Image: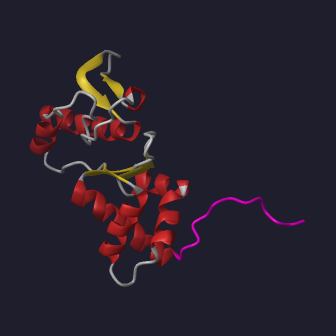
Amino acid sequence: MDEAPFAPTNRFPPQLTAVLMSHIQGLAMRYGALKTDLPKLAELLAYSIGEAAPSADELMRFMRLESVQRELESRWDVWLEQSADKAKTWRLVNLAMPADPQRAAARLKARPQQADSCTWCWLAEPGHRGVLQPYRDLNGRAVGGVHLHRACKAAWTRLENMVMRSDEK
């Protein structure tokens, strides 16, 4: 048998994939951070695309692909991942930074009201302490009140570096 082992792949044409990715990014930018079920996310995506949108089942299959999630995070500044909660909700988070160093500094100072929320995206993770990790400075000391998701940590670090560089000028 010459068949390759089954591996989930993106079966959408490249043009449609780019459209889907850009609309997912647009949703992340519009909401900042969203925690919802996958059918609702597919509904929002279909509404964003309009009449040319694939079916909800196709959109959900597309968003479930690990390769799509990795590409969104690495190239589109978007984190899309299924939560570990009982409801199996999904997180959609905008990882893009503000371009203005003053806005970036203000973002670093802002803190969510709930202690069990991520400091970057402010999504609450009640009862799931392992999902949020304390942020450590360059000396390895935990920064008080800063707890981040894995993907949000990279965005937070980039933001912190941007503010530090702007302070040096």
Residue 8 colored in magenta in the image: yes
Looking at this rendering, what residue extends furthest in the bottom direction?
51
Q: Where is residue 120 in the image (x, y as percent from the top left)?
A: 26, 39
Name the residue nearer the viewer: 83 or 86.
86
- Give the vertical position of 40 relative to 105 (above or below): below
Looking at this rendering, what residue extends furthest in the right direction?
1
- How many numbered marks are there? 0
Q: Name the image quarter holding the N terminus.
A: bottom right
Q: Main secondary structure of the magenta part?
A: loop
Q: Where is residue 39 in the image (x, y as percent from the top left)?
A: 41, 63
Q: Which residue does the image show at 14% across and 35% down from the upper left? A: 110
Please report the bounds of the magenta region as a residue range: 1-13
Please tell me in which quadrant of the rendered image residue 43 appears.
Answer: bottom left
Q: Name the image quarter holding the C terminus.
A: top left
Q: Where is residue 113 in the image (x, y as percent from the top left)?
A: 16, 32
Please tell me in which quadrant of the rendered image residue 135 appears.
Answer: top left
Image position of 160 (left or right of 106): right
Image position of 117 (left or right of 91): left
Q: Which residue does the image show at 39% across and 83% down from the upper left? A: 52
Q: Which color scheme does this rendered protein use?
A: secondary structure
Residue 36 colored in magenta in the image: no
Q: Which residue does the image show at 28% across and 41% down from the upper left? A: 123
Please tell me in which quadrant of the rendered image residue 9 appears.
Answer: bottom right
Name the residue nearer the viewer: 159 or 4.
4
Name the residue nearer the viewer: 55 or 96.
55
Q: Which residue does the image show at 34% across and 40% down from the upper left? A: 152
- Give the vertical position of 57 relative to 166 (above or below): below
